[in-house]
Amino acid sequence: MAAGATFLDTNEIVLNMGPQHPSTHGVLRVILKLDGETVRGCECVIGYLHRGVEKIAENRTYKQFAPYVDRMDYVAAVSNALGYCLAVETLGAVEVPERAQAVRVILSELNRIASHLLWLGTHALDIGAITPVFYCFREREEVLKIFERYCGARLTTHAFRIGGLEYETYDAFEKDCITFCDWFDKKVDEYEELLTTNRIWVGRTKGVGIIDAAKCKEYGVTGPVLRAAGVKWDLRKAQPYSGYEKYDFDIPVCHNSDTYDRYIVRMQEFRQSVRIIRQAVDSLPQGPIMGKVSKVYKPPIGEAYVSIEAPKGELGYYVVSDGSVQAYRLRIRPPSFVNLQALDEMCRGSLIADVVAIIGTIDIVLGEVDR
Amino acid sequence: MFRMAEILSNPYVQPLIATLLIIALFPLVAGYIVLAERKVLADLQVRLGPMRVGPYGFLQPLADAFKLLLKEDIIPAAADKWLFWGAPVLSTFTALTSFAVLPLSDKFYVADVNIGMLFVLAMSSIGILGLILGGWSSNSKYSLLGSLRSAAQMVSYEVPLGFAVVTGLMVAGTLSMQGIVNAQLEKGVWIAFSNYGLMLVPTVLFLIAGVAETNRAPFDLPEAESEIVAGFHTEYSGFRFALYFLAEYAAIFVISSLAVTLFFGGWLRPFPNVAFLEMPLNTVFPALLFGAIGAGCAVGVTRLMLPEQKGVLAVVALAMFALAAMFLVPALNPFIRGLFWFLFKVAIIVYTFIWYRGTFPRFRYDQLMDLGWRYLIPISMGSLIVNGIVLLATT
Amino acid sequence: MAEETKPGGETPAAGAKPEPPKKAAPVMQVTPWEGPLVDALKEHFGTQIKEFSVYRNQSFLVADLAAAIPILEYLKLEQEFDYLVDITAVDYPKKEKRFEVVWILYSFARNERIRIKADVAESESPATAVGVHIGADWLEREVFDMFGIKFEGHPNMTRILMPDEWKGYPLRKDYSIIQQDQEWVRENLKIESAQ
């Protein structure tokens, strides 16, 4: 004890959450400074899952590297692949045929649904509702079945190739997607019934983890967190890619920027994704699925930064090419890494129980944070 | 035979037998409540629950008991050894002692103390000590936080629990457990529905406060797994953990029994004084119930594959049919129908507790305190006053 | 479309072979970037910005290191580039100033994204961008962790992904892909080698 302090002085406790903890969604270590049950500050220690992906990219050809990106945000692997392929295609000025673009959109939106389902299940579990996680995984199972039928893998799909797609869609693909959409709409209604107006749920999430729009922009936070703060911005509308400009969908926005609003935004995103999938399946054009790409892919010297609206935020790839078959530098800008920075801001003044809810609401995947 | 009657009439013998039976059977009952919880939760969560040990997982509690007994006994180096040992013992002791006054039936109980209700409330208050000491003696931040939370929670919710109990006692007129049930028999209506339905408020309050008293969801902060690992029993493993578990499920049984005794007529059947319902409710209903369960088990036997499991389930089916038959024998019926109705009502309340756990998210600590102090206590005080006035005006 | 410059044709002369002209080193085929933003920047920073270019429809500028943070500040306050997307670096060991630090900015109001690049020598320390955009905190820590570029004025210039006591900067080109800090491995993992 400090000199002059009596045993009645309350000191701040330092509480360590993780790296092994049921609620930190992976190997994340959060060091909390507590004053009783109130959090005065928190510090994140990351890097437990660092695999040196960016270095590996410099030692593999562009095509060889594609499976590695799935392993970053392993919960939503397809969006990683989309960003990577788009970045590398921009470097080489490769045109992707329309059919490939439409199928990419369908798979990306299914992927968004799968990612948000996992988010909802684990977030509800952290807050104490132990049942929704099972329902969410039941729905996610259907999406993963579609992925498996399409490309053979459920989780790390390696679904896209540079220039388009490797596999043509299987015969029942469109029917499966529409069946899923019809079935899934009712499930979202079920979740809303269970949670949205539940007094305990509202009590645990309203007013928790507030970060206003200005602070979001300063930290660089994107995705549903930014939209829940009132900023109507989605890269699919602002800088459309892969044919998103053809589809009609809304950007859900809320204004209180608390955990409840982020929940509402993601629930609405379910419905919007279903809308996009239906439109894409209805208007799926015929045609080739692969653009003109040489067997040995050597983009000319140059650099490009391409980003997409991944389920968690802006996922960007900055690729520098020196004209060889391997990237000279591949930088991955992960949304979870940048969003996690704002945890300290969101946690100040809340209780320990809220820290868990806030970590859940940012929706991080450690594979992406650490790469 | 003569010697038997002589021995049985000794005032200590029957309570001793009852005590031994309860202590011997109780771990089994607690284990099966755990199994019921796992199966009901699984049903809510679209999955199956334990299915391997025994037919449809029926023997799972035995496997769990074995496992916990054989586990390595780990004590944190910095823990206070005696308190660490004594805390779960204290919790289990108080929970089991409460069983002594539960009116399981008009014929089967350990003791009918004339302050029975007060005794149970006192025991549950002492049981809180077991939780606090468990967290404290573990010498770990997580455990300490858990035990502080639980202490605050349980002490806060004892107040509305007490008020609800007192309101019920006003109508019953006595603290003795058998006396309360007999009062309901005289009145001809369960206390929950008496006093022009005003007693429903204390009934609901008791059930809510009871969930908080037993640390069940949505009030299970002390064990909030996702936040502070396992709260006050983080450092416990093996047999000590089993004791805490036992104590928790014993407490659930006790609180449900209190609710049943005080508000739902104890061992009385529904509509206790309506004569024409005597036959259907006391004879036909239990026989049909057990007969249906037996039939269900028999169907289950045909669906199973392993012969051992088939054997066990077949035995269970036969036991169910035997029970159903017992209710049809007029000489046996009066002895077992009290116990049947008591356990049936307790089962319904335990099912409701499990249902709450599967449905609701967890309250945060400050919200829980808010609910207890700002809402439940004023409402319970208000209901006490209103019920008292109405009671006085109508007698 | 970019093309590599083809070697000049040789006219075979009888007997002696003329020396083939040296191939020009291939470079990024950029087009100049023009517009009101460029004019405003030129006005403010003059010669401190060496290049305004566009490649594959993406605009970037190359500036002096000392001007990098003032440019970020100017863009945030005057030109509405309020979102710092990313900070990263690229290692060109053959260049005189081996690192190229890249800042990527986006403006919500203009829906425009630009890059600012600056060459940094191994011994140089760029100023931190934390005062302009709070989000630069972890991004700069990662650049330090991977390249060894220290940012002057950063509140917590420590490693973020690698262990704190790790020696070596993994994304530098002279750091082999299978290289590890053996001393750290031996001390902390208690094994001879993690290979």
Image (tube, coloured by chain):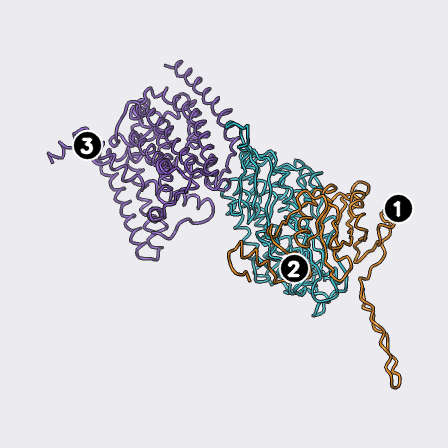
Residue that extends furthest to the left in the rendered view of this protein: B2
Determine which residue is flagged by label 1.
Answer: C43
Q: Along the horizontal axis of the image, is C144 left or right of C39?
A: left
Question: Which chain is rendered orange in the image?
Answer: C
Label 3: chain?
B
Q: Distance from label 2 to label 3 (Cα)?
A: 80 Å
In this rendering, is residue C122 above or below B276?
A: below
Query: Could you tell me if residue A260 is visible in this image?
Result: no
Label 1: chain?
C
Question: Which chain is rendered cyan in the image?
Answer: A
Q: Alpha-carbon neighbours of circle 2 within 10 Å: few (<14), some, or many (≥20)? A: many
Q: Quadrant of the N terminus of chain C?
A: bottom right
Image quadrant in which you'd find residue B95: top left
Determine which residue is flagged by label 2.
Answer: A55
In this rendering, is residue B310 above or below B195?
A: below
Q: Along the horizontal axis of the image, is B224 left or right of A321?
A: left
- Residue A283 screen position, x and y as percent: 69, 56
Mark number displayed over residue B13: 3
Q: Alpha-carbon neighbours of circle 1 within 10 Å: few (<14), some, or many (≥20)? A: few
